[in-house]
Amino acid sequence: MAVPSSVTERERKYEIVPGTGVPRLLGVAGVASQDEPVEQMLDASYYDTQTFRLAKAGITLRRRVGGHDAGWHVKLPVSADERQEIQLPLGGDGHKVPGRLKRLVRAYTLGEKLVPIAHLRTDRFAHRLADGQGRTVATLTDDHVTGEAGGESARLDEWREVELELDPGVEPGLLDEFDRALAKAGLSASPWPSKLRRLIGDRVPAPRRARKKPTAADVVLVSLREHYDQLRRADVGVRLDVADSVHQMRVASRKLRSALRTFGSIVDESATAPVAAELKWLGHELAPARDTEVTQERLGEQLDALPLELVFGPLRQYLTRYFAREEQQGRARAVEALEGKRYRNLLRALDAVLEDPALTAHGRKPAKAALRKPVRKAAKKLRRAEAATRGLEGVELETALHDVRKKAKRARYAADTVKPVYGKKLRAWRKNVKAVQQTLGAHQDTVVGRDVLHHLAVDGHGEGQNTFTFGLLHGQDAAKAAQLRGEFAGEWRRLRKGGRPGWL
C-alpha cells in the first residue's frame, strides 16, 4: 500500500490580460535563464462534502491526471502563499477517494460523504526559471483553464491565469521579488486562493467580518475558532506521524478547554461543560504519547551531560528498546482515539458551539467592559493556588505546585484571548505569569522524571542492567527540583508586585 508523501508548495497566482505574452523574468531573484514553455494537459476532479466543509477550511482534495505529479492531492493551507500538499499515486477506483485521504480530512468532514463537486481542465505552458548554475529557482506557468461545477445549477467558466511557484529549496522571501517584477509587467494578484475557489466562489460562505466595536463573545469566539483550527490541523499531523503533532494537538485541546471554562460567563458554561469534559478526555488519550516524547528527549540530554565513566553498561540500547515500546503504545492509543466515534462526536460538538454559540447577556456586551471579570477571576484563582502551597512539603508540595502551574497556564491563555482588546495593558503581567508557568513546568518535569527513573531502575534491574546511573540522575532531578522551587519564589514576588493592572 502506497504511503502518502508530503511537499511544501509556495506560489502566487496572477490575473493576465487576454492576448498578453508571458513576462520574461531574467535578472529577477537570481534568474539567469527562462526555458521555452513545456505544454502539459491537466485534468482534475475535485471532491468535497455537499456543504463544502473542505473549501470552508481552505482545503482542496483532487484527483489529477497529467503532469509530473499526477495522483491524488490534499492541499492544506499554511499561510497566504504556502500550502502543504499530501500526495498519493493514481491507482484503484478513479471515482472513489482513497480511504487514507478520507481519514486524513475526517476532522473537517465530520463523517459527511465526499462527492465530486467540480472538474477542471488546464492547458498549461510551464517555463522553468534557473540560476547561473542551472538550478531551478521557480516555475512560471501560463494556465488556460476550463471548469465546470455541478450542484443545483451547473456552472461553466473559462479563464487564463499565471502562477509563480518557487522551488522547494529556495528562500521563500524571493516571492516578493518576483511579485514586484510581475506587477511591473502588468499582472495583478488574483483575488482567488485556488482555481477551485474561483469556480465555486459564491457557493462557499464568506468569512465573518469583524465588527468595529466587538462584543465580548466576538473576541472569545475568534480565539476558540483559532484553537479549533489548530486542533484539526494537528489531527492531520498525528495521522501522518509528523514530529511534535501530538504536542500541538494536546496544546490546542487544552486551550479550547481553558477558554470554555474561563469565559463561561460569555459563552454559556452550562451549554459547553460537556464539550470541556470531552476535551479533557482527549488530552488524557494524547498524554502517553506526548509524555514519552518529553521524557525520552530529557533523559537523553541528561545522559549526554554525564561523564562517560558514570554511564554503566549498554544503557542507551536498553533505553532505545524501552522507549520504542512506550512510543508505539502511546501512538497507537492516540490514533485509536482519533478513529473513534467519541472523538468525532467531540468535533461535531465543537463545530456546533462555534456555528451556533449559546451566548449569555454578558457575551453581548462591549468587549472592554465584559472581559475584565473573567481575566480577574483567572488571576484570583492563580493567587489562591499559590497561597495553598505554603507550609507544604514533599509530595503534597509537588502536587500543589503543579496546580499553580495549571492555574498560571489558564491565566496566560486568558490574557492571550483578550489581547486584541487590552493590548499592552496585560503585557508585563502575562510575561510574569509565563515565567512562573515555565519554571513550574520544568519542576513538574523533574517530578515525572523521577517517577520514570524509579520505574527504569526496577525494570532494568529485572533485565540485569546496572541501574547506578538511574539512581544518580534521580538524585540530580531532586536537586534540580529544589533549585526550581527557589526560582519560582523569586518569580512569584515579581508577579505579585509588578506590572499588574489595577482592575486585576
Image (cartoon, rainbow, N blue to C red):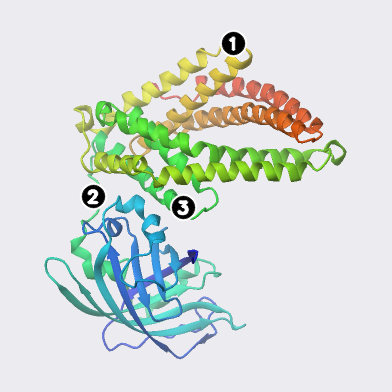
Query: Which residue, given by chain and number where applicable, does mark 2 sit on?
Result: 208
Tell whether 292 sits left or right of 151: right
Q: Residue 230 in the image: x percent, y percent?
A: 40, 47
Label annotation for residue 392: 1
Q: Residue furthest left?
A: 153
Q: Amino acid at mark 1?
A: Leu
Structural crowding at the residue carrying mark 3, measured as other residues with C-alpha within 10 Å and reported as few (<14), some (14–19) or many (≥20): some
Dot placed on the residue nearer the N-terminal end, 2 or 1: 2
**Which numbered disc, 1 or 3, marks the residue closer to the eye?**
3
Structural crowding at the residue carrying mark 2, measured as other residues with C-alpha within 10 Å and reported as few (<14), some (14–19) or many (≥20): few
Quadrant of the image containing the C terminus = top left
Answer with the quarter of the image where residue 124 lies. Answer: bottom left
Structural crowding at the residue carrying mark 1, measured as other residues with C-alpha within 10 Å and reported as few (<14), some (14–19) or many (≥20): few
Mark 3–mark 2 CB contact (< 8 Å): no
Q: Nearer the viewer, residue 247 or 324?
A: 324
Tell whether 168 sits left or right of 76: right
